[in-house]
């Protein structure tokens, strides 16, 4: 679920932050183009269907983290992805999952660290750049989101997920501009 620059013409950091949060809310309402989940092979949170859904039948932290992220249990996902990267620091998918978990917990400082480690391990992969762009977008950092999405599109020009996120970015920017006038 992992946006570009916010214009600096707004007076005061508090107002910029408010606009950034408003833009983030718009993005979330527009349709969860968050691809953080899709980048590691899971879809949107699945509805709980019963008591058995509370448990994951494995003791592999990366698998448990993925399942918890899929279910929308971001705190648990963070816990298990953190265990996974501590046990195997070269596990790219777990670093991406950890970053996605931090994004959903609004711990962007920690998400940035996890994205940086993932970039060191996997290079500038389209799926990773897309997630990072989405992270910037939900923060209201439209310029950095656009840069990341454009870089991802250069690698995979027909990727529907990235193209959709570019549309979400344009809508968020338009909403931001119209609310400012």
Image (spheres, rainbow, N blue to C red):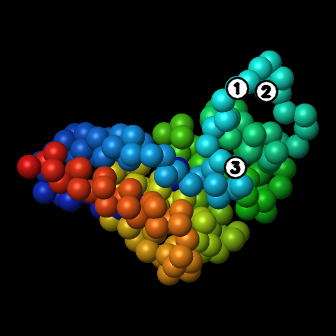
Asked if the residue at tag 1 contacts the one at tag 2, i.e. Cβ–Cβ closer than 8 Å, the answer is yes
Q: Residue pushed farthest right? A: 58
Residue at 54%, 40% in the rendered image: 104
Quote the CA–CA distance across marks 1 and 3. 15 Å
Instruction: Classify 21 as above or below 2.
Output: above
Q: Quadrant of residue 70?
A: top right
Residue at 66%, 29% in the rendered image: 47
Report crowding for label 3: few under 14, some 14 to 19, many 20 or more residues within 10 A (C-alpha): some
Q: Circle 1 — which element?
A: loop
Instruction: Classify 40 as above or below 24.
Output: below
Residue 61, given in percent of the width and then of the height, sits at 82, 42
**Residue bearing mark 3:** 42
Asked whether 155 or 116 is in front, the reply is 155
Q: Quadrant of residue 113?
A: bottom right
**Residue bearing mark 1:** 48
Residue 160, given in percent of the width and then of the height, sits at 53, 66
Tell me which numbered mark, 2 or 1, is placed earlier along the sequence: 1
Q: Which mark is residue 53?
A: 2
Asked if the residue at tag 3 contacts the one at tag 1, i.e. Cβ–Cβ closer than 8 Å, the answer is no
Residue at 23%, 50% in the rendered image: 175
């Amino acid at each position: 679920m992992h946006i570009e620059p916010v214009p600096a013409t707004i007076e005061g950091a508090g107002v910029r932050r408010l606009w950034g949060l408003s833009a983030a809310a718009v993005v979330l309402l527009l349709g969860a183009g968050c691809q953080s989940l899709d980048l590691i092979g899971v879809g949107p949170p699945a509805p709980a269907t019963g008591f058995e859904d509370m448990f994951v039948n494995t003791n592999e932290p990366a698998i448990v983290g993925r399942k918890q992220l899929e279910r929308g249990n971001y705190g648990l996902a963070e816990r298990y992805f953190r265990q996974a990267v501590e046990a195997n620091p070269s596990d790219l998918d777990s670093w991406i999952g950890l970053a996605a978990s931090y994004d959903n917990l609004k711990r962007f400082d920690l998400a940035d660290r996890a994205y940086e480690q993932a970039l060191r391990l996997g290079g500038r992969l389209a799926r990773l750049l897309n997630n990072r762009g989405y992270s910037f977008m939900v923060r209201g950092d439209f310029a950095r989101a656009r840069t990341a999405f454009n870089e991802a599109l250069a690698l995979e020009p027909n990727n529907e997920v990235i193209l959709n996120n570019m549309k979400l970015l344009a809508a968020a920017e338009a909403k931001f501009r119209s609310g400012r006038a």
